[in-house]
Image: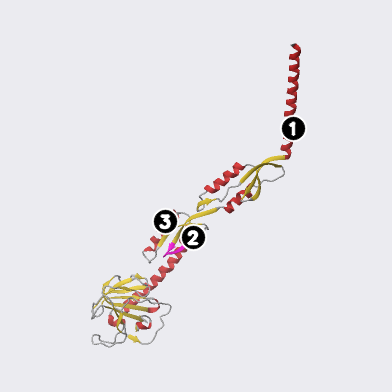
């Protein structure tokens, strides 16, 4: 029996020695491998080998942070594919490529940007990053210019895959302010001209001292028809109902028809005359002036800025009139011109 125990004890010692030798060998081999090799992950993205990274979890965390980023006008980041990782032992001299992997993922991402367009009279003037900046800009511009000139400043939220140039609010304010400043100056100059015309031409008789039957160049101004209708009396016509030759063009149409101003300008008169009835005078650039007479209603006042196509009055038969029609006059520097040379051709 003692011999058996001695045998077991002997073999147990041998087993422990063998196990120790194996473990020691593994440790020595591992140390040798660690000296020569290191663990890494081979990265494949969109069927392209991007090299190795030391820690795939850290790389994935960086990618998640990029996708979740909502700064710099970014509304959404979409990845068509995620990188694939394969564990490997690589030479210690082999360089990992974390930055290259992240850069490749970012380059192929589909990014949607959200920003705010500042529109002036329907046209985009600038972009800013936040709604607060856009509202501040519009409020500032409207406070400074809104009551002085006829402008429409609006904000539009924009989503796009390609980000336009985004400017600082100070830059947008300066650029738009410069444009509005020019418009304001133009309006002030036109108002001064309108006041000068108003002082000189105060009544129907004083308004037109001469008539021209020739075609006069109006410069860079295009006119539109104020109403649609039938021509009932032409320029220069002689009639018993008038003290002199007809200085305008009569267009017969239904009572209440809206009368459009033929071009941008400033209203220099809106009121009553015993011959013209209710009528409106508008001063345009280049010394051009238009008159709209015999109206049933007037929708504008003297000093008001009007844009081409605005409804300024309604057709009627007031004053020295025999029926519903618009009496239209076109003048340049106080000389009455034949409207048929420019309209109703």
Distance, label 3 to label 2, CA atoms, is: 15 Å
Mark yes or no: residue 302 visible.
no
**Position of the C terminus by quadrant:** bottom left
Determine which quarter of the picture holds residue 222. Answer: bottom left
Residue 120 magenta-highlighted: yes
Q: Which mark is residue 135?
A: 3
Which residue does the numbered mark 2 point to in the structure image?
171
Which secondary structure, mark 2?
A: helix
Label 1 packing within 10 angstroms: few (<14), some (14-19), many (20+): few
Residue 317: % across, % down: 24, 77
Label 2 packing within 10 angstroms: few (<14), some (14-19), many (20+): few
Determine which quarter of the picture holds residue 282. Answer: bottom left
Relative to 167, does residue 33 appear above or below in the rendering?
Answer: above
Q: Which tag is nearer the camera, tag 1 or tag 2?
A: 1
**Position of the N terminus by quadrant:** top right
Q: Residue at coordinates 38% horizontally, 70% vertically from top-left?
A: 188
Secondary structure mostly taken by the magenta-highlighted segment of the chain: strand
- 45 or 37: nearer the eye? 45
- 19 or 302: nearer the eye? 19
Residue 31: % across, % down: 73, 34
Which residue does the numbered mark 1 point to in the structure image?
28
Q: Which tag is nearer the camera, tag 3 or tag 1?
A: 1
Specify start and end residues of the magenta stretch as a single range.
119-126
Relative to 15, does residue 4 appear above or below in the rendering?
Answer: above
* Image marks 3 and 1: residues in contact by CB distance under 8 Å: no
Which secondary structure, mark 1?
A: helix
């Amino acid at each position: 029996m003692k011999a058996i125990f001695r045998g077991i004890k002997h073999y147990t010692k041998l087993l422990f020695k063998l196990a120790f030798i194996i473990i020691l060998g593994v440790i020595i081999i591992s140390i040798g491998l660690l000296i020569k090799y290191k663990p890494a992950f081979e990265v494949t993205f969109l069927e392209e080998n991007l090299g190795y990274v030391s820690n795939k979890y850290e790389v994935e965390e960086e990618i998640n942070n990029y996708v979740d980023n909502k700064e710099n006008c970014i509304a959404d980041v979409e990845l068509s594919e995620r990188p694939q990782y394969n564990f490997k032992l690589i030479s210690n001299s082999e360089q990992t490529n974390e930055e290259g992997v992240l850069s490749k993922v970012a380059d192929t991402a589909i990014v949607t940007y959200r920003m705010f367009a500042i529109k002036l009279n329907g046209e985009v003037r600038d972009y800013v990053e936040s709604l607060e900046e856009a509202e501040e800009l519009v409020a500032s511009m409207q406070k400074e210019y809104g009551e002085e000139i006829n402008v429409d400043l609006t904000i539009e939220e924009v989503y796009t895959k390609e980000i336009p140039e985004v400017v600082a609010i100070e830059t947008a304010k300066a650029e738009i302010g410069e444009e509005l400043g020019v418009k304001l100056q133009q309006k002030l100059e036109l108002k001064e001209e309108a006041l000068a015309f108003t002082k000189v031409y105060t009544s129907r008789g004083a308004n037109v001292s001469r008539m021209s039957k020739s075609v006069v160049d109006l410069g860079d101004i295009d006119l539109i028809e104020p109403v649609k209708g039938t021509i009932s009396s032409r320029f220069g016509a002689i009639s018993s109902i008038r003290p002199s030759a007809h200085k305008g063009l009569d267009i017969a149409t239904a009572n209440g028809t809206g009368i459009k101003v033929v071009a941008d300008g400033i209203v220099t008169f809106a009121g009553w005359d015993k011959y013209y009835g209710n009528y409106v005078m508008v001063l345009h650039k280049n010394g051009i002036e238009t008159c709209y007479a015999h109206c049933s209603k007037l929708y504008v006042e003297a000093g008001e800025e009007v844009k081409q196509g605005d409804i300024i009055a309604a057709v009627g038969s007031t004053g020295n009139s025999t029926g519903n029609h618009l009496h239209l006059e076109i003048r340049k520097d106080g000389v009455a011109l034949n409207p048929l040379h420019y309209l109703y051709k």
